[in-house]
């Protein structure tokens, strides 16, 4: 079996995502290991002409960073600036991407519940104009998380996302941009001693650095002194098997 045939076999998660988006599902949760392209897919797959809005959740995320906040625009003058969620609501075909949603807590979680509610229930009032805003007809939300246990996400938030897809492999197009000798390892998501978990970002960095600095220096810079030799040995063995 060729490597490309192997790609096709394990790409089912990406086919699932494409099928769900094509079917018009507007609330999707992507979960699984980091470095497989979940955020890139959320930002670009099935998005219209308007760029997707992105939120990265932290424990310190506030509701103002989601819906908007007052900003100074001159001496003793303040103006309301809408946040990414409301901008996505207003955009024709707009999408909101909520990264690392499991880290959201408190005030931010309550606001996310309001912003991701069903189109029939969701609404928000602009504090400056008192205008009621509702999500546009093509508005969609994609949440991402690196956790594998979905029970770690608040049940009330999960309930708003009827489709959950585990993304555990890089997309074929992402693999194709790597040098051929790295593709099988990137597909497996591991390299070196004890099949150490390696993200796609690390493979990209190693691939680029070794072109300029050579494989030994690149392995040292990306994987560290303790692992570099083992990584190079693993690649050497893979090249002759």
Image: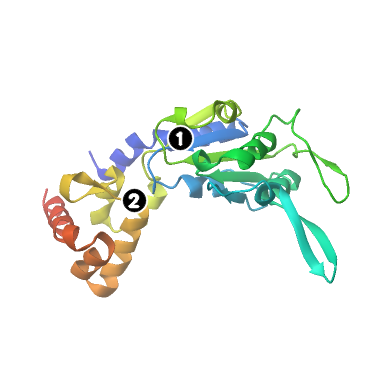
Residue at 66%, 48% in the rendered image:
66
Dot 2 corresponds to which residue?
199
Give percent across and percent down for residue 67: 71, 47
Contact check, label 2 and label 1, Cβ < 8 Å = no
SS at circle 2: loop
Task: Give residue 180's position: percent from left, percent from top.
Answer: 26, 55
**Left or right: 120 with respect to 31?**
right
Frontmost residue, 97 versus 45: 97
Left or right of residue 163: residue 79: right
Q: Which residue is mark 1?
A: 15
Return the mark for residue 40.
none
| Left or right of residue 70: residue 3 | left
Task: From the top left corner, tell me how far across and down residue 21 is, in percent.
Answer: 57, 35
Mark 2 or 1, which is nearer the eye?
Answer: 2
Residue for point 55% across, 26% down: 155
Q: Nearer the viewer, residue 191 or 236?
A: 191
Q: Secondary structure at mark 1?
A: helix
- At 49% from the left and 50% from the top, the residue drawn is 40
Q: Quadrant of the N terminus?
A: top left
Q: Give the camera-side residue of 176 and 121.
A: 121
Q: CA distance from mark 2 to mark 1?
A: 21 Å
Q: Residues within 10 Å of mark 1 (few under 14, many from 20)?
A: few
- Vertical side of 120 occupied by 241: above or below: below
N-terminal of the pair, mark 2 or mark 1, is 1
Residue 131 placement, left or right of 210: right
């Amino acid at each position: 079996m060729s490597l490309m045939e192997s790609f096709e076999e394990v790409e089912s998660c990406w086919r699932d995502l494409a099928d769900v988006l094509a079917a018009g599902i507007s609330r999707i949760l992507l979960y699984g290991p980091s470095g497989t392209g979940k955020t890139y897919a959320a930002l670009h797959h099935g998005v219209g002409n308007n760029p997707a809005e992105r939120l990265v959740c932290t424990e310190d995320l506030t509701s103002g960073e989601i819906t908007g906040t007052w900003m100074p625009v001159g001496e003793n003058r303040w103006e309301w600036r809408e946040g990414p969620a409301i901008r996505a609501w207003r955009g024709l075909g707009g999408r909101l991407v909520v990264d690392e949603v499991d880290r959201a807590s408190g005030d931010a979680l309550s606001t996310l519940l309001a912003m991701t509610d069903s189109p029939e229930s969701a609404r928000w009032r602009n504090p400056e104009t008192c205008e009621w805003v509702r999500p546009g007809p093509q508005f969609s939300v994609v949440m991402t998380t690196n956790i594998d246990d979905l029970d770690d996400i608040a049940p009330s938030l999960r309930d708003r996302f009827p489709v959950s897809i585990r993304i555990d492999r890089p997309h074929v197009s992402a693999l194709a941009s790597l040098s051929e000798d790295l593709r099988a390892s990137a597909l497996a998501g591991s390299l070196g001693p004890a099949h150490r978990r390696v993200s796609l970002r690390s493979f990209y960095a190693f691939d680029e650095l070794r072109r300029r600095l050579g494989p030994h220096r690149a392995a040292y810079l990306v994987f560290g002194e303790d692992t570099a030799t083992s990584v190079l040995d693993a690649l050497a063995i893979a090249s002759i098997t």
